[in-house]
């Protein structure tokens, strides 16, 4: 499968944080959920991909092209950053008038249709918008120049459940064109469980997992066991464990194999939230 | 780049009423013959343009603009061009008003009006020339303090030089300046503008958001 984003050994060093050898690929026509706790390196990685900060080392290729083709690459990328970014004295109309000169493929009709669909006023200043409305406007803007990749940093934060469903529907519709792909960071992992094809998990500046969602949710599991049962488990058969008040939660990467080997029947299906908690808070 | 200019002009459209009010005040004072404030309008238009940096910084627009095609270069180019455009429009407007007012006052001094116009353009663009690279490098808040300290410092240094040194030019120099002042001014301002723009562009191209 062709990759639209290829990241190899990406490093970026700050005084108090370091991104260490981040590598992953985003295949064409897929959605990748990029998860991790606050400060794990999601936004830094996204900023590096977008070339708004410079890496210390490593390679980034988008559509097979490197940074020399920055202008060409950016014509085909739609972006939502984690912070709001439109000057709030502008109106959606002002944004339309400006953006149609910034992107070759800007589609005013599409932009206006989305505004109508999301009930966003065209002539009101953004400062009068709620947080959710601002986010919707950013998403609408990211979509309205027919990008081939959407790079979205927390696009659903601040949205109410109804708006989140609307936005996710739009992402799914966007991906129906198999030329299009999405890299999406989010804290709302239930959204990712619905729409993502791949999950990349970053912790403390390192990618600790990058797999298909199905592989992850089908094969990974949480074994619920007592202290005595836990003591019998070979260290190489689990990834991490977390000690609770009355039992142990043990993260395993192959439920079937584990079940065959040990006589422990309670293996819960994993959610992305469970995975994050046990990977970050768990012990080895 | 046109998109960025449109965005900057859209951001200051709420200030247009204020600028229109200033034009009326200027016309009124001119007709009364009280004082010539023709330089104030272009100067204020630069300050209005500088205020767009505050909006950009507050809303983190710069990071987003860096994600747009050629966004870093175009955003700088647009800031310079929209400021120059606004200064020129305001100066031409006040110059036309100056002619109309002096016609009514029956005191047309074409040379004086044109010299004021050139001086105004040069003076206001100097603010842009020195301020914009500083804003791009250090941010709008620090640049404001810098502008205050810089202006204050220049006035003191200028005052000291005039007070303690006997500065006089030979008649040949004065004659040369008189004949070629406009050309010298135009060449100097355009050269400085270009240098200032290139410095700003370099700062923004290297900047991390």
Image: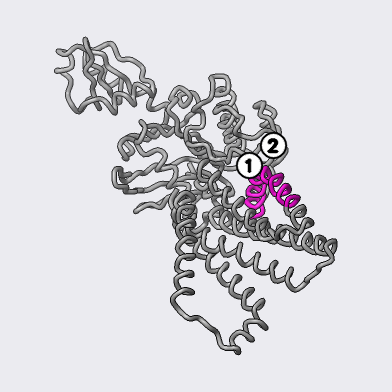
Instruction: Give the percent coordinates (x, y) of residue B9.
Output: 66, 49
Circle 2 chain: A
| Residue count near mark 1 (Cα–Cα under 10 Å), binned few <14, some 14–19, many ≥20 | many
* Quarter where residue A141 is shown: top right
Q: Is residue A157 visible?
A: yes
Between disc 1 and disc 2, whose residue precedes? 2
Q: Is residue B204 visible?
A: no
Question: What residue would you read off at disc 2?
Answer: A110
- Image vertical order of residue A158 relative to residue B72, above or below: above
Along the line of sight, which residue is nearer the eye, B84 or A201? B84
> What mark, if any, has residue A174 been given in the picture?
none
Q: Residue at x 51, y 26 (%)?
A: A158
Instruction: Give the percent coordinates (x, y) of residue B203.
Output: 46, 59
| Residue count near mark 2 (Cα–Cα under 10 Å), binned few <14, some 14–19, many ≥20 | some
Cα–Cα gap, marks 1 and 2: 9 Å
Circle 1 chain: A
Residue B19 highlighted magenta (yes or no): yes
Instruction: Give the percent coordinates (x, y) of residue A263.
Output: 22, 12
> What mark, if any, has residue A146 been given in the picture?
1
Q: Main secondary structure of the magenta part?
A: helix
Asked whether disc 1 touches disc 2, contact meaning CB atoms under 8 Å apart, the reply is: yes
Instruction: Give the percent coordinates (x, y) of residue A272.
Output: 38, 24
Q: Is residue B183 left or right of residue A253?
A: right
Q: Is residue A227 left or right of residue A172?
A: left
Along the line of sight, which residue is nearer the eye, B14 or A223? B14
Image quadrant occupied by the C terminus of chain A = top left
Residue A263 highlighted magenta (yes or no): no
| Secondary structure beneath label 2 | helix
Magenta residues span B1-25
- Image vertical order of residue A121 relative to residue A77, above or below: above
């Amino acid at each position: 499968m062709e990759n639209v984003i290829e990241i190899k050994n990406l490093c970026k060093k700050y005084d108090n944080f370091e991104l260490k050898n981040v590598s992953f690929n985003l295949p064409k026509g897929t959605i990748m959920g990029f998860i991790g706790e606050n400060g794990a390196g999601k936004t830094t990685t996204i900023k590096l991909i977008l070339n708004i900060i410079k890496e210390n080392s490593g390679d980034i290729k988008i559509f097979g092209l490197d940074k020399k083709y920055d202008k060409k690459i950016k014509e085909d990328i739609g972006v939502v950053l984690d912070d709001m970014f439109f000057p709030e004295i502008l109106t959606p109309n002002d944004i339309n008038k400006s953006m149609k000169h910034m992107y070759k493929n800007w589609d005013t009709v599409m932009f206006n249709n989305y505004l109508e669909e999301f009930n966003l006023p065209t002539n009101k200043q953004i400062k009068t918008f709620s947080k959710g409305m601002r986010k919707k406007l950013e998403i609408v803007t990211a979509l309205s120049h027919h990008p081939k990749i959407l790079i979205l940093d927390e696009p659903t934060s601040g949205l109410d459940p109804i708006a989140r469903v609307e936005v996710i529907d739009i992402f799914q519709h966007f991906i129906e064109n198999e030329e299009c792909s999405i890299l999406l960071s989010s804290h709302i992992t239930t959204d990712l469980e619905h729409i993502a094809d791949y999950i990349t998990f970053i912790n403390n500046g390192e990618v600790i997992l990058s797999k298909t969602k199905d592989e992850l949710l089908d094969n990974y599991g949480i074994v619920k066991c007592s202290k005595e049962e836990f003591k019998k488990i070979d260290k190489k058969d689990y990834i991490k464990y977390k000690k609770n008040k009355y039992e142990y939660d043990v993260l395993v990467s192959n439920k079937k194999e584990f079940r065959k080997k040990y006589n422990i029947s309670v293996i819960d299906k994993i959610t992305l939230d469970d995975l994050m908690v046990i990977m970050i808070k768990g012990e080895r | 780049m046109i998109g960025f200019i449109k965005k900057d002009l859209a951001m200051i459209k709420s200030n247009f009423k204020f600028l229109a009010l200033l034009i009326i005040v200027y016309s009124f004072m001119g007709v009364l013959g009280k004082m010539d404030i023709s330089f104030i309008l272009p100067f204020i238009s630069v300050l209005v343009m500088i205020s767009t940096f505050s909006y950009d910084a507050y809303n983190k627009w710069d990071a987003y603009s860096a994600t747009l095609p050629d966004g870093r270069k175009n955003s700088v180019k647009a800031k310079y061009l929209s400021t120059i455009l606004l200064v020129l429009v305001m100066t031409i407007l006040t110059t036309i008003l100056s002619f109309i007012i002096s016609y009514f006052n029956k005191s047309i001094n074409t040379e004086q009006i044109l010299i004021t116009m050139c001086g105004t353009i040069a003076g206001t663009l100097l603010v842009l020339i020195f301020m914009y690279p500083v804003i791009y490098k250090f941010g709008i808040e620090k640049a404001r303090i810098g502008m205050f300290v810089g202006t204050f410092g220049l006035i003191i240094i200028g005052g000291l030089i005039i007070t303690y040194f006997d500065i006089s030019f030979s008649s040949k120099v004065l004659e040369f300046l008189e004949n070629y002042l406009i050309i010298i001014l135009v060449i100097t301002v355009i050269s400085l503008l270009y240098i200032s723009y290139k410095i700003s562009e370099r700062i923004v191209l290297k900047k991390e958001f």
